[in-house]
Amino acid sequence: MFLSCAHSFAQWEKVDDPWDDEKKEVVPERVSILSWFGDRKHNHSKWYEDQACAWQMVVEKNPKDENAWRNLFYASYSCEFAFTYNPNRPKKKESSKTAEVIRKMKAAIPDSHTFNLCASRFWLAEWGEFDCNVLIDAVDSKLSSFDIEETRFFAYELWKVDHDNNLIYNIFRKLHEFKYVDEHPMQYAWNLMLGMQDSAIYVACREYDYEPMILMQEVFDLRKDITILPYEFIKDRKFCDTMYKRLNIKPYVMDISDTRSRKDIIGDFVTYVSRCSGRPLYMSMDAPNYITVNEDSVYNEGLLLKYSNKPYNNLKVALHNINEVYELGYLTQPEFTYNIRWTSTVDKNVVYCMKNMANKFCAKGFKADCERIENFLKRVYLKTSTTGGVEQFNRELIKKQ
């Protein structure tokens, strides 16, 4: 079926419509939200723009066609917002073409699964505070039809706003069945969890530092005593309210006249949570790039940083973790699965951390421990280079041996 976008929405509504450009004949195809781990076949905004025009014509013919609305929204959203370097990206969400699409959708098919699906991703401030029931309906109604990108988005969104919902297990289980998290990132996250004390609080800044961990908590019921605070979720009031109840602490009150940087404000928030809860607080290694805390209170324990106002022998803890706690043998073993997501990054993180600790042990006179770590890293490098890996693990380390 070939459709021309030249006719636009003129027959449906005598006003300017979002996608009203004249286009050549375009075949409407199923559209998925553009994502870096999804189908890269249509990795250019022109294809999404054409699809938005084509699906708008379908909607014009049948304003109750939910499938057409879904594809129109996904095409519009991907064209305007999914590309990182999009010079035509709207400066304001509310004035975008996508906003117009979803306003028309709300008028045509309110309370439908499709509207709830799209509104969960693109809620407009004019509708008031976000309604969690919209998100719950989107997950509950058509979970079986979700692709990997939809499953990933709704899994962590639902976890953020309704952490105890019974749907959490089902959607994370589906995400695991999609093999969203590869083997090495899962092993990496497991070692981070092994290195934390009971009832710990964990502040993470990158997806690979917390998404695999949440998945293991929800699907495999592992280390659910750990309270995970993703950096990007801290600004969400509903998430913070749930976290305060879980930790049994009073909400953090921010001074509205505070003109400091976001790093400083988040730093105060983190230290407040640690102090009021009385729980051990851990951070991912890159946390100091995003959060300002007293450097004298941050200790390296191997793969994680620990925040503590009381000095202690963190090298002893790190040595114990490396020798007795962490399970790092997977780094020297053949890779029998095809890993594409985060594997190179998390493996490099481990190698960097281990080399850093080896240097510290050597400086403190623990030469045997230093040599044991460096011999392990040599085996990691040899395995990687033998299997044709692109990572170039510290060649000076080899020379030193």
Image (cartoon, rainbow, N blue to C red):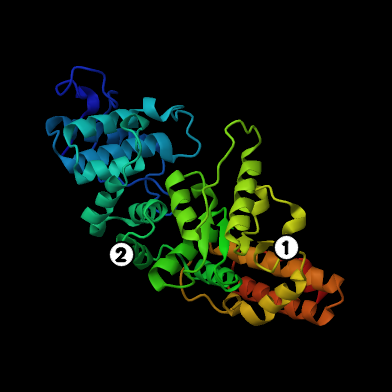
3D distance between C-alphas at marks 1 and 2 = 38 Å
The disc at residue 27 is none
Residue 283: x and y in percent read 62, 59
Q: Residue at x 30, y 48 (%)?
A: 135
The reply to whether residue 98 is in sight is: yes
Residue 119 sits in quarter: top left
Residue behind mark 1 = 299
Q: Residue furthest top?
A: 14
Image check: 69 left or right of 216?
A: left
Residue behind mark 2 = 170
- Pointer 1 with pointer 2, Cβ within 8 A: no
Seen in the picture, residue 223 relative to 168 is either above or below; the reply is below
The reply to whether residue 3 is in sight is: no
Residue 82 sits in quarter: top left
Seen in the picture, residue 160 relative to 325 is either above or below; the reply is above
Q: Quarter of the image containing the N terminus?
A: top left
Seen in the picture, residue 164 relative to 112 is either above or below; the reply is below
Residue 162: x and y in percent read 36, 54
Query: Looking at the image, how many numbered discs can be counted on the residues?
Result: 2
Image check: 310 left or right of 72?
A: right
Q: Specify few, some or many for label 1: CA neighbours under 10 Å numbering under 14, 14-19, or 20 or more.
A: many
Q: Identify which amino acid the numbered label 1 is placed on.
A: Tyr
Residue 68: x and y in percent read 20, 40
Q: For the residues carrying marks 1 and 2, which lies nearer the camera in this image?
A: 1
Image check: 110 left or right of 166?
A: left
Q: Identify which amino acid the numbered label 2 is placed on.
A: Asn
Q: Earlier in the sequence, mark 1 or mark 2?
A: 2
